[in-house]
Image (cartoon, rainbow, N blue to C red):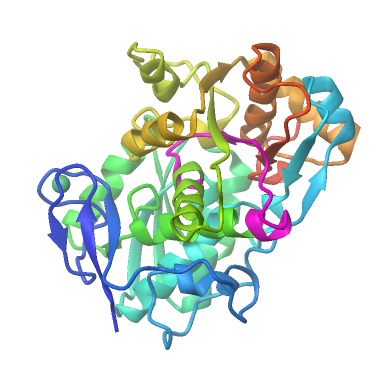
Amino acid sequence: MWNLHLVCHACGQEFPPTHRAPFCTTCQGPLDILYHTPPRSQAGEGPGIWRWRNAFPLAPDLPPVSLGEGNTPLIPLERAGEAAGCSRLWAKLEYLNPTGSFKDRGSALLLSALKALGVQRLIEDSSGNAGASLSAYCARAGIQAVVFVPDTAPRAKVRQIQVYGAQVRLVPGGRQAAALEARRAWERGEGAYASHAFSPFFLEGMKSFALEVFAQTGGDVPEHIVFPVGNGSLLVGTWLGLLLLKQEGRLGRLPRLHAVQARRVCPIVAEWQGGEWKPRPGVRTIAGGVAVSQPARRAQVLQALWETGGQAVAVDEVDIRAWQKVLAQGEGIFCEPTSAVAFAGVALLCAGGVIRPGERVLVPVTGFGLKDRVPRG
Ligand SMILES: [Zn+2]
C-alpha cells in the first residue's frame, strides 16, 4: 500500500511510512518522503489537487479525504501591480480553498494518509489557519482533533476550529509554547501528532500549487513567486513541485522564489542576511500566520531561495496594513494580514531592483480576511 519511506532532512535516518511521529525521533528534524517509484507531474482525471495524484505519496487505490481543495484562480492585479511598481503582477486566490486558506492542500493529503493508517485521534498545534483546516478535514474523515492554539490567536480562527468539532486548548506564551504543549500531549499518548509544520505528507500536498501554476500558465511560469513565510511549507512544497517538473524536462528554468516575513518575527530573513534573530518578549506582528520564531523547515526554505536565486526580505507593520487595504479597495481582494506581507515584499523587491521591469510576478493570497481581526475601512 505504501511505496515509500520517510527520511530525516537533517540526519538522513529512514523510517517506515507507519512511523508515528511527524519528525525524526533521533534528531527532531523534519521528515521528507523517499519515493521507491519516482512521482510524476502528469495530470490525471481527479478534481482539484487530486488531478496531481501521480505526484503524491499515496497508493492509487487509497480513497482521498477531500473537500474540493485546489484549482484556485489565477488573476491579474493591475492596480496593486502599479502600486508595487510591477506591471505584470498576478495573484493565486488560495483563500478560495474550503476553509479559506492554502493549508487545505496539505490537510487533504495528511488526513488521507492518517485515515489509511487507522488514526482515530490527532493532536495539532496552530496559530489558526492550519488548525481550522486540519479540524475540517478531521470532521470529514471521522477523526477527533485536539488543537493547541496560542491564546493570542484571533478569536475568529479559534471559533472556526471549534465549529468543526475540534477540541481547542488555549496555551499562554505564543506559538512555540503551543507546539511544546502539543508535543507533551503526544508523548502522554493522547493521539497521533499531526504537526503540519513537520509532516512530510502535508508538505507534499503543497506541490499541487506549483503543478497548478504550471498548467494555468501553459508551462510558461512567471519569473518570480513571492511567498509570506512562517514555517515555509508552501514555499518548500512549491519548490519540490517545480523541481519535479524540471527533472522531467517539462520546465526549462525555475522561477525565483522569494520569502517575505514581518520584521517583528523574521528568523529566516535574519539568517539569510548572515545574522541571528531573537524573539523579543511582548513584540507581536498582526501577521499571525507568519509569526513563527523557530521555523521547522528553515533549512529547506534557505536552500530553495539559494538554488532559485531568490531573496528573503522583511516588511514593517504599517506596510502590511497598507497593503491589506490596497488589495481590498483596489482589487476587491480581502486577505488576512499574513497574505498582505507578501505584497509589501513585492514592492520592496521591485524598489530594490530584484524584480526588474517587465518581469512577471505571482503571489499566493494565502488566507481570507474574515479569519482575522477586521480592519477599519
Ligand atoms: Zn534526524
Is 301 left or right of 333, judged from the image as shown? left
The residue at the point 51 percent across, 33 percent down is 290
Span of residues in magenta: 213-234
Question: Is 13 located above or below residue 271 in the figure?
Answer: below
Counting from the top left corner in percent of width and height, residue 115 is at 38, 77
Q: Nearer the viewer, residue 186 or 91?
A: 91
Query: Is residue 221 covered in magenta?
Result: yes
Q: Quadrant of the C terminus?
A: top right
- Reply above or below: 215 against 25: below
- Outermost residue toward the left in this view: 26
Which percent across, then down, holds residue 280?
Answer: 39, 13
Tell me the residue at 68%/63% (across/down).
71
Q: How many marks?
A: 0
Is residue 217 shown in magenta?
Answer: yes
Quarter of the image containing the N terminus?
Answer: bottom left
Image: 372 above or below 241 = above
Q: Is residue 138 visible?
A: no
Out of 179 and 152, give the one closest to the viewer. Answer: 179
66 lies left or right of 40: right
Which of 335/128 is in front? 335
Can residue 65 be spotted in the picture?
yes
Q: Position of residue 122 (x, y in %)?
A: 34, 64
- Which of 139 and 42 lies nearest the eye of the viewer? 42
Q: Position of residue 14 (x, y in %)?
A: 15, 59
Task: Give the side of residue 187 with respect to residue 214, left or right.
Answer: left
Residue displayed at 69% across by 28% down? 343
